[in-house]
Image (cartoon, rainbow, N blue to C red):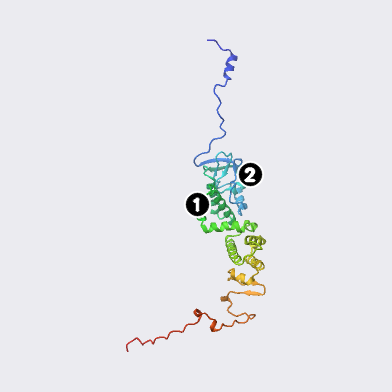
Amino acid sequence: MKKLSQEEITEKLNLDHFPRGPELERLSDPIIDTPMLVTLEQLRPYEHNPRFIRNPLYDDIKASIRERGLDQPPPITRRPGEPHFIIRNGGNTRLAILGELWQETRDERFFRIHCLFRPWTDEISALLGHLAESDLHGQLTFIERAQAVAKLKTMLESDGATLSQRELARRLAGGGYPISQSHISRMLDTLEHLLPAIPQTLYAGLGKPKIERLIGLRSQAERTWNRYPSDAIVFTEFWLDTLGQFDADPESFNLEQIQDELLERMSRLLGQSYRMLALELGDTHRVIRAPDVVVTPPESNPLQSVNEPAAEPPPPSRIPNQLKPRPRPKQRERNSSRCP
C-alpha cells in the first residue's frame, strides 16, 4: 500500500465526507408548563390586550416592583413560528413597568425574568384569558370589556356562522368568562349607539349605571320619535348629533341635561309640545322643565294649579255606561235568614 504524504493526508481530512444537514434555528417550545428565564428583548405585550386605558394603579405597581422586584411574574406563551414570547394572560402592565425600570436603572433584575411558559392554544383562548384576568381584579372600564366581548364575537364568527347573544354568552362562559345575555346586549348597544357620540366620556371611565340609563333613554326617545314620523332627519343621526354635544368628563356628565336637550330638539323637529313629548317619554319621576310649564307627577302634586281653571265634570249623558256608578244592591237584613 502506497504511503500517503503529509500533504495528501491533510487534503483528505479537509474533505466534506458527510453532507451538512439543515441548521436548527431554535429549539421547539415545550409541550407542557415549563419554568423559563427570559429577557425583555424576548418578550412582547399581547397586541389584543383588552386594556387600552392606563391602569389607574400604574404608579403604585411601579413603586412596588422597584422596591420588591417582581413578586408574580406573568405567564408567557408563544405562537407557532413566532420569534418572540407574549404575555399569556394579564401582566401587560407589569411588562411595561419592567421596561421603564430597566431603562431608568439598568438593574438586571428588571431585564431577566423567571416566567412560567405555557403552550400556545389559540387566539380566542388568549383573548379570553386576558379579559378574565383583567376583569377579575375589577380594573377594566365598561367600554374596554364591551370592545373585548365584541372582538371575541367576531373571532367566534370567523367561520361564517352568526352567533346569537345567548349563544355568545354560553360560549364565553364555557371559556371561563361568565356573562349574561342582557349584559352582552348592553355592551353591543353601547358600541353602536353611544361610542360614536361620546368616545371621550366612555374612555374616561363612564360607569355602568349611567350607561344603562342612557341606553334606556335612547330606547324611549326612539319609540316616541317613531310616533311622529319626520322627513327632516332620521332618528339615528338625530340621536348621535344631540348626544355628541355632551362628550365630556364623566363627573360632569348630566343625564337630565341630555334628556332636556333631546326633548327641546324633538319638540322643534316633530312639531309637538315639550310637555306632551316628556309625558310620552315616560318621565314621571322628576319635575320636567318646559317653557312656562311645570309638569309634576300627580301623586306628588294633588293641588290644582292656580294658573289653570278647574275642569268641569262632563254631563251625565256623555259618561259611558261602563263608567257610570251602578246602584248598590240592597243589603239583606242580618237576621232575615235566621230562625228566631
Q: Position of residue 249 (x, y in %)?
A: 65, 60
Residue drawn at point x = 62 percent, y = 47 percent? 96
Depth check: give the residue in front, 324 or 89: 324
Residue drawn at point x = 57 percent, y = 17 percent? 12
Q: Secondary structure at mark 1?
A: helix
Whether pointer 1 and pointer 2 mark residues with C-beta atoms closer than 8 Å, the reply is: no
Q: Is residue 77 left or right of residue 102?
A: left
Mark earlier in primary sequence (1, 2): 2
Residue drawn at point x = 61 percent, y = 70 percent? 278
Mark 2 residue type: Trp
Residue 267 in which image quadrant: bottom right
Q: Position of residue 155 (x, y in %)?
A: 55, 48
Distance from label 1 to label 2 (Cα)?
40 Å
Q: Which mark is residue 171?
A: 1
Depth check: give the residue in front, 173 or 64: 173
Residue 217 in which image quadrant: bottom right
Label 2 Cα crowd, 10 Å radius (few <14 / some 14-19 / many 20+) = some
Depth check: give the residue in front, 293 or 79: 293
Depth check: give the residue in front, 191 or 18: 191
Q: Position of residue 248 (x, y in %)?
A: 66, 60
The mark tally for this picture is 2
Mark 1 residue type: Arg
Vertical comparison of 260 with 324: above or below: above
Residue 129 visible here:
no
Q: Which mark is residue 102?
A: 2
Q: Position of residue 115 (x, y in %)?
A: 55, 43
Given the current orientation, which residue lies at the most extreme top position?
Answer: 1
